[in-house]
Image (tube, rainbow, N blue to C red):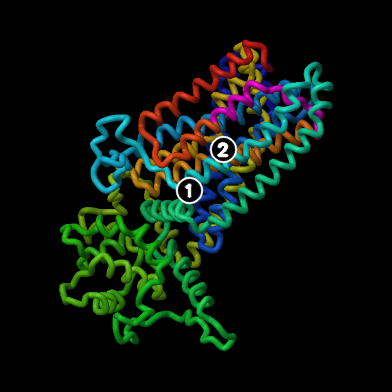
Amino acid sequence: MTIPNIDPAEVGATGLAWLLISYGYVLYAASNLISEGSDLLLLVPSLAGLVGSVVLPLLGAVPDGAIMLFSGLGDVERAQETLSVGVGALAGSTIMLLTVPWGLCVFKGRVDFTEPGMEPDYKHPSKLSSLSTTGVALSPAINHGAKMMMLTTLPYFIIQTPAFFFTGTRETVSKGEHYWALGGFVVCMIFFVAYLYTQVKESNDSAHKLRRMAVIKESLKKGAMSLKGALGAEVKLVMEREHSLTCVTNEATPLNTAPMTLTRRNSYENDDMNPPPEITELLEGILGDAFRGYDLDRNGSLSKKEFCLFLADFHETVSPEILDEVFLFLDKDGSNSISYDEFIVACYLILKTNDSDHRSPTRSSIIALSTAGKSIIDAEGGEEEEEEVVPEDFTSLSPEEQQFAIKRRAFTMLFIGTTLVLVFSDPMVDVLSEVAARLRIPPFYVSFILAPLASNASEVIASQYYAAKKTRKTIIVALTALEGAASMNNTFCLSIFMALIFFRGLAWQYSAETISIILVQFGIGVLALRGKMTAFTGFIVLAMFPLSVLFVALLEFLGMD
C-alpha cells in the first residue's frame, strides 16, 4: 500500500510520534466503525442470527488480521524482520484480551458469595467486603468457550514442533517448516469453519440473545429508533415462523398480516392477544427496566399518563382510540392502570397494530407530559450518560424505512471501517518497526503493547459495559466474547501466518512468544472451567499480562528464539 506515503525512517522523533498516534487513532476509529456497524445489523431480525454468530467474530478479527498480513508482505528479507510486528500483534491481542479486560470484568461484575455453598448471590445488594468472598459465576457457556479456546491452540503445536528442531538461516528453517505450515493452515481453516458452525448452531443461546437485546436497548435509549422500528420486524418474523410451524397441510389458513383492529376482539382471553413466549422474553429483556423507570409513583403499575410518556420517549405515536382500546382490554379491574404483565402485552399489541401516522413526538411534547424527561432507566444500577440527540427525521420514518436506513448505515460503516484498516495497517507496521529500531528493542515488544490498544479497544469497552451490569447473564456475554476473540486469533489470524510461511518462504522463529501465548490460554482456560471466579483470582488474571512479557524476555535471554 502507498497511502499515506510517509516513510517513518525519514522523520524525526516528533514526526514519528505523530505518525504513531495518527495511524493508531485511525485504526482505533476504524475498529469502532466495524464494531458499531456489526452491532447495527443486530437490529435487523432477518440478519441477526448470521451477524451475531459469523459477522461479528469475523469482522472483529479483521484489524488484527490486517496488521499480521501486511507484516509479512513486501521484500522477503524485510518481511522476515517485520513479521515480528505481526507476531507481537497476535500475542498482544490474544494475551491482552484474556487478561486485562477479563480481570476487570471479574472485578466490575463481582457480587458477594452466599454461605455455605459460596455461590455468587445476584439477588441481594453486594457489600463487596473481601476479594476472596466476592466474584462472578462461570456458566456452562463460559466453560464451553474455554474448551474451544484451548482446543484451537493445536495449530501452534503443529508449527512449533519443527521450530524447536530446525535452526540456521531463514531459507533452512523455512524449508524445514514448509509442509508443517501447510498442515497448520489446514487445521486452522478446519477449526475456523467448525467454530463458525458452532456459533451459528448456538445463535439462539442466551449470550447471543443478550447481546442483541443490549444493542436494541441502547438504540432505543439513544432515541435512534422508534419502538416499532426496533421491534416491529422481529414481531412479524416470529409471527410468521409460529404460523409456519402450525401449518400441517398446504391448505392451512394463510397468515393474516393485515392491520389489526382491536375493536374486533371479543375478550382478553383470546389467544391472539397474548405474545408468543419468544416475543415475551424479548420484550421483558428490553422493556423491563423501562417499566420500572416510568412507574413514577412506584406502585407496580403504569397509569395511562405514564404509559403515554413511555410511548412518547420511545418515539411511538399511538392514536387515542387505540390507546383507549388497549387499556379497555387489559385494565380488568378498572383502575385505569396496567400491571407489568399487561404492559408487555400492551407493547405487543401496539407493535402488531399498523398505524399510518409515523410522526415522532417532539421533545417539547415529551417534556410537557413529564418534567422527568425519562429515557430507558437502567434498573440494574448503571449510571446514565447524556446521549446526543438523534435527528427526528430518522425516528419519524416508518418501521420499514427505519430498517432500510439501519442496513444502509451499517454497511456504510463496515465499508469505511474495513477500507481504513486495509489502508492504514501497512504503514502502521512500518511505524511500529521504526519505533522498535529507534528504541533498540525487538519489534515484538512494541507491537505487543501498542497494537492491541488500536485494534481491540472496542472489545475491551464492550466487555466492561456488560460486566458492570452485575448479572449472571451479562457476565456470560462479556467473558464468552473474550474467549471467542481468542479462538478467532487461534484460527483466522494464525492461518494468515501459516499461509505467509508456506507461500512466501518465511520462517517461524518465535518459540518464546508461542509458549507464552499457549500458557496464558491454558491458564485462563483451566480457571474458566470452574463454577465461579473470585475477585482475587481476577487480580491474578490481570497480572498475567505483564508477567507474560517478562516470561518472553526471560526465555529469549536464556537463548530461545
Which residue is drawn at the image coordinates 55% and 40% (left, top)? Answer: 485
Packing grade of label 2 (10 A; few <14, some 14-19, many >=20) is: many
Q: Specify the farthest residue to the front.
A: 116
Which residue is drawn at the image coordinates 51% and 34% (left, top)? Answer: 97
- Residue 551 visible to an observer of this rendering: yes
- Residue 3 visible to an observer of this rendering: no
Q: In the figure, residue 106 lies in which quadrant?
A: top left
Which residue is drawn at the image coordinates 19% and 61% (left, top)? Answer: 300
- Give the residue type at disc 1: Ala
**Is 440 or 317 nearer to us in this picture?**
440
Image position of 441 with respect to 490: above or below = above
Packing grade of label 1 (10 A; few <14, some 14-19, many >=20) is: some
Q: Which residue is tagged 2? A: 486
Numbered disc 2: secondary structure:
helix
Q: Give the side of residue 110 with respect to residue 446, left or right.
A: left
- Give the residue type at disc 2: Ala
Q: Which residue is tagged 1? A: 141
Magenta range = 503-520
Can you tell which of label 1 and label 2 is closer to the viewer? 1
